[in-house]
């Protein structure tokens, strides 16, 4: 007879954490792929000025490959580098960060990490003490929902905003009467 808790791994074991992490990554990537699964005009629009164009069906295939085999780092490397030549900096950031978390190859992690950094760096601007972010130019709205890209920009901006003892909070800046 086994008593409750006997024969079980203690909380915080790597097996349970890895399963939860894999589930979270899979859920997140499913949402990303569903949001990005746009029509071909979207894929064409985001490639303006790109040195090498990727066909819309190739973008869709890479996204489907990542969804089917979500634990394979190479899928995200191809997505990050392909979207890295587009107007949508949000996707190389997301796919690049996932790649860096999954890959064991330090050189490739460094290369993709550099792409992620460049995408963030190009998206941030500061003028007169105001911080702004531009990770997307061609977000599409579907069925009355705000575009994922814009929501990610807002979340990133809130995370990047300096909050410290010398700065006033975002709430007080937005509500000067309070």
Image (cartoon, rainbow, N blue to C red):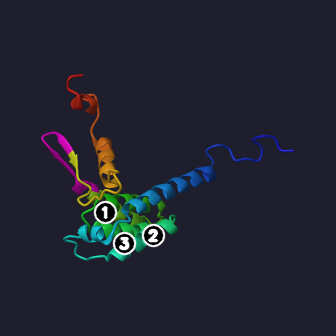
| Residue at 50% in and 64% down | 70
Q: Percent x, y for residue 146?
A: 32, 50
Report whether residue 100 is seen.
no
Q: Which quadrant of the figure contains the C terminus? A: top left
From the viewer's side, name the closer residue of 49 and 127.
Answer: 49
Q: Name the residue under label 2.
A: 64
Estimate the spatial distance between the alpha carbons at disc 1 and disc 3, rounded to whole Å.
18 Å
Estimate the spatial distance between the alpha carbons at disc 2 and disc 3, rounded to whole Å.
9 Å
Do residues under tags 1 and 3 come within 8 Å of each other at their CB atoms? no
Image: magenta residue range: 120-131
Question: Is 124 in the magenta?
Answer: yes
From the viewer's side, name the closer residue of 76 and 58.
Answer: 58
- Residue 99's quadrant in the figure? bottom left
In the image, is residue 158 above or below residue 26?
above
Q: In front of the other: label 1 or label 3?
A: 3
Question: Is 154 in the magenta?
Answer: no
Q: Which quadrant of the figure contains the N terminus? A: top right
| Residue at 30% in and 46% down | 154
Q: Name the residue under label 1.
A: 115
């Amino acid at each position: 007879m086994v008593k409750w808790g006997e024969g079980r791994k203690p909380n915080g074991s790597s097996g349970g954490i890895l399963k939860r992490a894999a589930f979270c990554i899979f859920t997140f990537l499913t949402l990303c792929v569903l949001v990005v699964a746009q029509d071909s005009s979207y894929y064409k629009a985001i490639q303006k000025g790109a040195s090498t164009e990727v066909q819309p069906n190739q973008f869709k295939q890479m996204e489907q490959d990542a969804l089917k085999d979500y634990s394979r780092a190479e899928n995200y490397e191809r997505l990050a580098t392909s979207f890295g030549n587009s107007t949508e900096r949000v996707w190389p950031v997301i796919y690049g960060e996932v790649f860096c978390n999954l890959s064991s190859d330090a050189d490739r992690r460094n290369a993709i990490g550099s792409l992620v950094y460049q995408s963030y760096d190009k998206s941030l601007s500061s003028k007169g003490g105001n911080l702004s972010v531009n990770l997307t130019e061609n977000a599409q709205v579907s069925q009355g929902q705000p575009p994922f890209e814009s929501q990610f920009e807002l979340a990133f901006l809130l995370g990047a905003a300096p909050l410290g003892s010398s700065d006033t909070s975002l709430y007080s800046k937005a509500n000067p009467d309070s």
